[in-house]
Amino acid sequence: MTLEGIKIGIAFTGSFCTYQAATEELRHMAKEGADLYPIMSFHSQRIDSRFGKAQDLRSQIEEICGRSAIDSIETAEPIGPSGFLDILIIMPCTGNTIAKLANGITDSPVLMAAKAHMRNEKPLLISISTNDALGMNFKNIGLLMNCKHIYFVPFGQDAPEKKPNSMIAHLDLLLPATQAALEGRQLQPVIR
Ligand SMILES: Cc1cc2nc3c(=O)[nH]c(=O)nc-3n(C[C@H](O)[C@H](O)[C@H](O)COP(=O)(O)O)c2cc1C
């Protein structure tokens, strides 16, 4: 299976240190022929950090995807009624967005996209990057893992000594995890 012609929503949230690796994976997906629709959380659109400027991220992902980012709740909402995405990937997915998703909160373009997409019972793939995965957000990750149509890019601890609660997705597994999710499967092992 290739990604040729597959319509993929790529939703960015505010894990700024992950953007470089995430945009590289986005380039892989574009090379594989995927039809990419970028979506940005309010914070990913706004915050300049030591990892780069928000506008630079936006320009880069719009250039790779070849279209403007969905950047508001009202522009994300039509994903539901038009049902045009085959899969939605939240990459990187912050602890904040995980917690809100698990609790039915819809106050950012990414969360609106997820809610809209899931009404169509199509796959949502989550690529986590959060310092509280094994802390405050452990319960939320567990809750999402047990939800229909939600899949994870396999993930593991990235710095167990210095940041014992931190976990991050293995982005080199994004493509196989996407293909598995499109087939209704979780790529295993999910923790590695
Ligand atoms: C420099 C910087 C780096 C951050 N890195 C992360 C991160 O890797 N993972 C995470 O869950 N939150 C991280 N945050 C916190 C989120 O940006 C914050 O929780 C924000 O509310 C996320 O909003 P969003 O999920 O709507 O994008 C970081 C914040 C800053 C300023």
Image (cartoon, grey):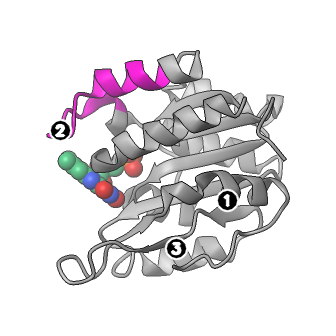
Instruction: Determine whether the residue tagged by mark 1 lies in a helix, strand or loop.
Output: helix
Residue lying at 54% horizontally and 79% vertically, measured from the top left = 191
Answer whether labels 3 and 1 touch (C-beta < 8 Å). Answer: no
Which of the two discs, 2 and 3, sits closer to the camera? 2
At label 2, which amino acid type do we have? Ser
Indicate which disc, 3 or 1, sits on the residue closer to the N terminus: 3
At label 1, which amino acid type do we have? Ala
Q: Residues within 10 Å of mark 1 (few under 14, many from 20)?
A: many
Q: Position of residue 190 (x, y in %)?
A: 60, 76
Which of the two discs, 1 and 2, sits closer to the camera? 1
- The residue pinned by badge 1 equals 177
Instruction: Determine whether the residue tagged by mark 3 lies in a helix, strand or loop.
Output: helix
Looking at the rendering, the stretch of residues picked out in magenta corresponds to: 45-62
Up the image or down, 100 lies above or below 13; here it is below
Could you say which quadrant of the image residue 38 lies in?
A: top right
Could you say which quadrant of the image residue 53 lies in?
A: top left
Q: Is residue 130 left or right of residue 123?
A: left
Compute the Cα span from label 3 to label 1: 17 Å
- The residue pinned by badge 2 equals 49
Name the dominant secondary structure of the magenta segment.
helix
